[in-house]
Image: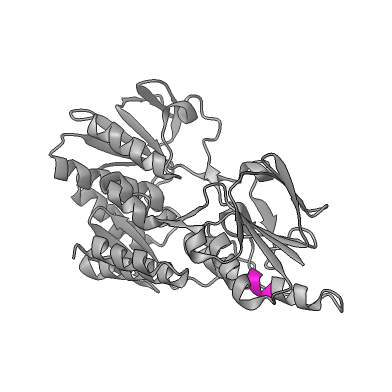
C-alpha cells in the first residue's frame, strides 16, 4: 500500500508522523517536500528581527521522520488517477494527502505582486529585514492586518526601537477592524498593542495598485513607500491550479485523496467553515491520519465509515513585537502571561513533532531567558 504525503508544513508533518506510528510495516509512506525541511510558519516573522532564529524554526525532515523524503516540487495532482506529477518525475499512490499549504494572494492588483514582499519563506523574512534597515527616515507599508500582518508590523516596530531607526510604519486593512476574522475583544486588544508601538493603523482602506515607490489606495490617495510588505490574503497551491479545494468534513477529494490544512477550504461536521491556521491544520491532520489508517486496514474488505472532522478552537494567539495577545475562550489576556502562553504553545508543537532541542531554544528566545 503506497501512501503519499505532499508537503511537510503543519498538516504534512503531523500527518506523516501519525501514519508512521499507526500504519503497519506493509504500508510505504513517501513525503514530498521541495525544501526537505519543515518551517514553523507562525514564528517566521521573528526572523525579521532575529535572523539567528531561522535555525530553530527550520527542521530537517530526516531528523523527525523515518520514511522516505523526496526533495522535489509537486507540479500537479490528479485525484481521479491517483497520480502526482513531480518536477521531472511522477508518483502513483493508493492514498495521498495534499498538504501543500497556501500561497500569497495578490488578487491581480496591478503592480502589487511585482513590488511587495510576502512572508511565506525564510528568504522573504531576510529581504524584509534588509529593506527595513535601509528605510531609515522613510515609510514602510504593511498590506493586510490579519494575524500575519499584525505580527510583521509589531516586529518591525520593535526592530526600529532596537536599531534606533526613524521609520513610519503604516498598517493597511480593507475591513473596518484589525484581525477582522476574530472576536471584538480580541480585535480591540490587538489594536491597543499596535497603537502603543506608534503604528499608523488604517482600516477600511483597500489597496488599488502599486508602482516602484507609490501605493494607490482605492479612494485615490497615494502613499509613498520605501518598503512594501503584503500579507493581504491566501490562495491555493500551484499544484492545485491556485485553488483551495472545497472539501467536506472528511477532507476527502476523490476516493484516495485528501486535502489537509491551508490548501483546502473545509466545512466541518457542524457545517462551519474552518479557519486557515496552524491549529486547524494539525487537528485536520490527526483526523485524516485516522481515516487513512482505517481505509488501509479495511481496503480489501469494505469501505469503512470515515470520521467527520469538527473544529473547536481553544483560543488564539498573536505576537505584537515583544508583546502578545491571547484569547482563551471568551477571555483576552496580554502582557507576560500571553507571551508565556505563546512560547509554551510553540514549544509544545515543536516537541510534538520531535524537535525537542528546537523547543527549548524557542522558549529561551521568546521569554528572553
Residue 347: x and y in percent read: 36, 68
Q: Is residue 247 left or right of residue 158?
A: right
At x 73% / y 75%, what residue is drawn?
A: 306
At x 52% / y 56%, what residue is drawn?
A: 9
**Farthest residue, direction right:** 301
Say above or below: 8 vs 14: above
Which of 355 and 285 lies nearest the eye of the viewer?
Answer: 355
At x 33% / y 46%, what residue is drawn?
A: 152
Q: Quadrant of the N terminus?
A: bottom right
Main secondary-structure element of the magenta-colored stretch: helix
Q: Is residue 221 left or right of residue 333?
A: right
Q: Quadrant of the C terminus?
A: bottom left
Q: Is residue 3 left or right of residue 263?
A: right
Report whether residue 203 is seen.
no
Say above or below: 120 vs 181: above
Report whether residue 87 is seen.
yes
Which of 260 and 54 lies nearest the eye of the viewer?
Answer: 54
Which image quadrant for residue 316?
bottom left
Residue 12: x and y in percent read: 57, 60
Which image quadrant for residue 72?
top right
* Range shown magenta: 287-291
Residue 34: x and y in percent read: 56, 47
Amino acid at each position: 500500500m503506497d501512501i503519499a504525503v505532499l508537503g511537510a508544513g503543519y498538516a504534512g508533518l503531523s500527518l506523516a508522523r501519525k501514519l508512521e506510528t499507526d500504519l503497519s510495516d506493509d504500508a510505504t509512506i513517501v513525503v514530498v517536500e521541495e525544501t526537505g525541511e519543515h518551517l514553523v510558519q507562525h514564528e517566521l516573522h521573528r526572523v525579521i528581527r532575529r535572523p539567528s532564529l531561522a535555525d530553530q524554526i527550520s527542521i530537517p525532515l530526516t531528523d523527525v521522520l523515518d520514511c522516505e523524503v523526496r526533495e522535489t516540487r509537486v507540479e500537479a495532482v490528479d485525484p481521479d488517477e491517483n497520480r502526482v506529477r513531480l518536477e521531472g518525475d511522477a508518483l502513483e499512490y493508493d492514498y495521498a494527502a495534499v498538504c501543500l499549504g497556501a500561497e500569497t494572494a495578490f488578487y491581480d492588483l496591478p503592480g502589487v505582486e511585482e513590488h511587495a514582499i510576502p512572508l511565506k519563506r525564510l528568504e522573504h523574512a531576510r529581504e524584509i529585514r534588509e529593506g527595513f534597515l535601509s528605510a531609515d527616515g522613510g515609510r514602510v507599508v504593511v498590506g493586510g492586518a490579519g494575524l500575519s500582518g499584525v505580527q510583521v508590523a509589531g516586529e518591525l516596530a520593535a526592530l526600529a526601537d532596537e536599531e534606533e531607526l526613524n521609520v513610519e510604519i503604516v498598517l493597511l486593512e480593507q475591513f473596518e477592524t484589525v484581525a477582522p476574522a476574530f472576536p471584538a475583544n480580541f480585535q480591540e486588544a490587538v489594536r491597543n498593542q499596535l497603537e502603543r508601538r506608534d503604528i499608523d493603523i488604517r482600516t477600511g482602506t483597500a489597496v488599488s495598485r502599486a508602482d516602484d515607490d507609490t501605493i494607490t489606495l482605492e479612494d485615490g490617495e497615494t502613499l509613498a513607500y520605501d518598503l512594501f510588505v503584503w500579507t493581504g490574503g491566501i490562495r491555493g497551491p500551484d499544484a492545485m491550479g491556485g485553488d483551495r479545494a472545497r472539501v467536506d468534513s472528511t477532507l476527502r477529494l476523490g476516493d484516495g485523496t485528501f486535502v489537509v490544512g491551508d490548501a483546502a477550504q473545509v466545512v466541518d461536521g457542524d457545517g462551519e467553515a474552518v479557519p486557515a491556521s496552524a491549529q486547524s491544520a494539525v487537528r485536520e491532520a490527526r483526523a485524516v491520519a485516522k481515516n487513512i489508517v482505517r481505509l488501509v486496514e479495511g481496503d480489501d474488505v469494505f469501505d469503512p465509515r470515515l470520521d467527520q472532522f469538527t473544529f473547536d478552537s481553544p483560543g488564539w494567539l498573536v505576537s505584537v513585537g515583544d508583546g502578545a495577545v491571547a484569547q482563551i475562550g471568551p477571555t483576552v489576556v496580554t502582557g507576560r502571561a500571553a507571551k508565556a502562553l505563546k512560547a509554551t504553545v510553540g514549544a509544545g508543537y515543536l516537541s510534538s513533532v520531535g524537535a525537542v532541542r528546537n523547543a527549548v531554544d524557542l522558549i529561551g528566545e521568546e521569554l528572553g531567558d
